[in-house]
Amino acid sequence: MSQMMHECFDDEIAIDFPSVGNVVDRMRHAFLGERVDADVLRADVSLSHREAQEGHVVSLKVPVRITCPNCGGRGETWTEPCALCVGTGESLFHQALRVSVPPRVADGACVRFRLKSADAASIRVELRVAIRSSAA
């Protein structure tokens, strides 16, 4: 089965029905235009039991590739490689985000979203929640 359906509809499908994996993959591609093996930026967040029960806002920074502001994406200035992007035409920017984790989230749950910008390609982000034990 293609990567155990870890993408966007897997939360809605019970583990008891693994035979629907191919159907979900086709629906995801048809409706969302996403490939199962497309790049996903993954991050982990650790919450206390109280934060998990009440919901919590998490701050994180997501690396985003943007068009180089120095060369406009050409990779060069006149005949020389661009010094800022080293000829790639892209620069790396860290976008600060605040993500709301919903109340009563379970340990191991994923919050998925897409980060879109006018200056960059959209980025799929998967934020996996871990609930700390009370001893920690």
Image (cartoon, grey):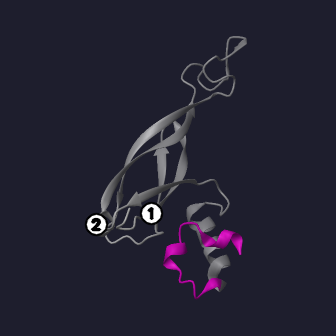
In the image, which residues are magenta? 1-18
Which quadrant would the C terminus be assigned to in this image? bottom left
> Residue tagged by mark 1?
129
Residue 105, horizontal then vertical, whole percent: 37, 70
Question: Of marks 2 and 1, which one's residue comes earlier in the chain?
Answer: 2
Q: Nearer the viewer, residue 124 or 32?
A: 124
Residue 50, disc:
2
Q: Nearer the viewer, residue 84 or 59?
A: 59
Residue 27, disc:
none
Label 2 neighbour load within 10 Å: few <14, some 14-19, many 20+: some
* Residue 4 is one of the magenta-drawn residues: yes
Residue located at (55% from left, 34% from top): 66
- Kind of element beneath mark 2: helix
Q: Amino acid at mark 1?
A: Val
Residue located at (64% from left, 78% from top): 21
Residue located at (28% from left, 66% from top): 50
Using the image, determine if residue 123 lies above or below residue 21: above
Using the image, determine if residue 135 lies above or below residue 120: below
Residue 104, horizontal then vertical, whole percent: 33, 72
Which quadrant would the N terminus be assigned to in this image? bottom right
Residue 47, horizontal then vertical, whole percent: 37, 61
Q: Is residue 85 left or right of residue 14?
A: right
Residue 80, horizontal then vertical, whole percent: 71, 12
Q: Are marks 2 and 1 in contact (CB under 8 Å)?
A: no
Q: CA distance from mark 2 to mark 1?
A: 13 Å
Q: Amino acid at mark 2?
A: Arg
**Furthest residue toward front:** 135
